Image (cartoon, helix red, strand yellow):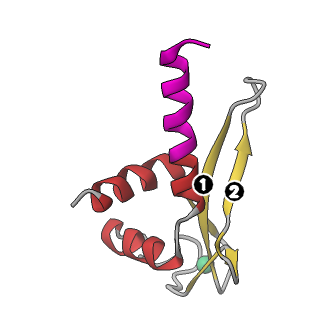
Amino acid sequence: MTDEQITEQTAETKQLARLRAVTFDELDAFYAEMGTEHPCDNCGSNEWTHIGDGEGPVSLRLPAFNRDTAFALAFAIHCNKCGNMRLTIGSTLLDWLQNKDHQ
Ligand SMILES: [Zn+2]
């Protein structure tokens, strides 16, 4: 493995660790800033619940169909009335968090 590959792998590990440490408060701040709290497209309700548990948000691992080991990570909220889900791709959240972390 080259130094460049090791550097890339280390950066990826740090990014995954940061996504694992995301809190409900950080997601709420992200959603508020991005306007994701708008009413549900399906039913008009604006009551949303995070996908998560007592340990915090759960990120969803979405495997790629046409790449053997590739996957995307997403965070989700669902409408309390009709169950409609909204997904946020982890890379966008990570960019937002890194800007916040460095301010
Ligand atoms: Zn709904």
Residue 10 left/right relative to 83: left
Q: Is residue 89 visible?
A: no
In the rendered image, the vertical position of residue 79 relative to residue 98, given as above or below: below
**Magenta stretch containing residue 12, yes or no?**
yes
**Which quadrant of the figure has residue 67?**
top right
Q: Report if the CB atoms under discs 2 and 1 are less than 8 Å apart.
A: yes
Quadrant placement of the C terminus: bottom left
Give the magenta range.
1-14
Ligand 1: image quarter: bottom right
- Residue displayed at 52% across by 73% down: 23
Measured as percent of width and height from the top left, residue 53 is found at 71, 79
Q: Which mark is residue 60?
A: 2
At label 1, which amino acid type do we have? Answer: Ala
Measured as percent of width and height from the top left, residue 61 is found at 71, 50
Q: Earlier in the sequence, mark 2 or mark 1?
A: 2
Q: Residues within 10 Å of mark 2 (few under 14, many from 20)?
A: some
> The residue tagged with tag 2: helix, strand or loop?
strand
Q: Main secondary structure of the magenta part?
A: helix
Residue 45 left/right relative to 67: left
- The residue labelled by disc 1 is 74
